[in-house]
Image (tube, rainbow, N blue to C red):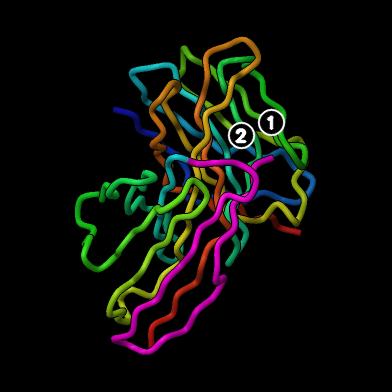
Amino acid sequence: GAVVSQHPSRVICKSGTSVKIECRSLDFQATTMFWYRQFPKQSLMLMATSNEGSKATYEQGVEKDKFLINHASLTLSTLTVTSAHPEDSSFYICSAGALWASGGESSYNEQFFGPGTRLTVL
Amino acid sequence: AQSVTQLDSHVSVSEGTPVLLRCNYSSSYSPSLFWYVQHPNKGLQLLLKYTSAATLVKGINGFEAEFKKSETSFHLTKPSAHMSDAAEYFCVVNLSGGYQKVTFGTGTKLQVIP
């Protein structure tokens, strides 16, 4: 199956610093990547949709100036948490979308998820 | 619009007994449906998916789910729970065709009692 990697898997930083998280699709090209945030014991919350070569689309309530997304190539998207604060501590997960054909039926979309990045801001 | 409801936030079963995790969806179009499992401090692992082919879908680790359009359900089952099944399970819905955005359920935490 398709593989998506994230780097780093874990990062601890001081308040006020910026942190960059990379998301790569290793064996397929993804025109669309997604960034999620997950608080403890909660479901995944979509932060933004990232399309290669264009600006990301942010979900309501997500600060685009704080969470900078760059999707420069078909296999790489980055999320930069700028001026991080303790409340930004969370588990960040990316996914890469791919369109598959389903054995004669209509095509369907599937997202392949990265392993996640645990961000802790001190 | 699409939505997904996981009816139970927490399910507790004894080891060796059947597992049932419920999921209902709402979609204006023909959906694709997925079940993911997440172990503590880990990423998501795909268990199985429904993509408009067979309505009974078999996944990994003995899990299966049945798509029932009349009931708008996609419940996850396993005949016999194992201790390693203890985790968080997410039901996810996605519209077919060119629309890629998915909607996550709120998750069901499965506890397996020895």
Q: Position of residue B41 (x, y in %)?
A: 58, 67
Give yes or no for residue A3 being in the magenta stretch.
Answer: yes
Residue sitting nearer the eye, B89 or A91: A91
Mark 1 closeness class: few <14, some 14–19, many ≥20 residues within 10 Å: many
Residue sitting nearer the eye, B100 or B23: B100
Q: State the separation of the CA atoms marked 1 and 2.
A: 6 Å
Quarter location, residue B57 = top right
Tag of residue B96: none
Give the amino acid type for the residue marked by disc 1 in the picture.
Glu
Image quarter where the C terminus of chain B lies is bottom right
Total marks placed: 2
Tag 1 subunit: B
Mark 2 closeness class: few <14, some 14–19, many ≥20 residues within 10 Å: many
Horizontally, residue B100 falls left or right of residue A23, namely: left
Horizontally, residue A1 falls left or right of residue A83, namely: right
Residue at figure coordinates x 57%, y 26% from the top left: A100
Residue at figure coordinates x 61%, y 23% from the top left: B66
B11, above or below A22, in the image? above
Magenta residues? A1-30
Q: In this rendering, do the residues under marks 1 and 2 share a single chain?
A: yes
Tag 2 subunit: B
A14, above or below A4, in the image? below
Q: Position of residue B54 (x, y in %)?
A: 65, 15
Residue at figure coordinates x 52%, y 19% from the top left: A107
Quarter location, residue B93 = top left
Between discs 1 and 2, the one toward the N terminus: 1
**Which residue has dot 2 on it?**
B76
Cβ atoms under marks 1 and 2 closer than 8 Å: yes
Tag of residue B64: 1
Q: Secondary structure at mark 1?
A: strand
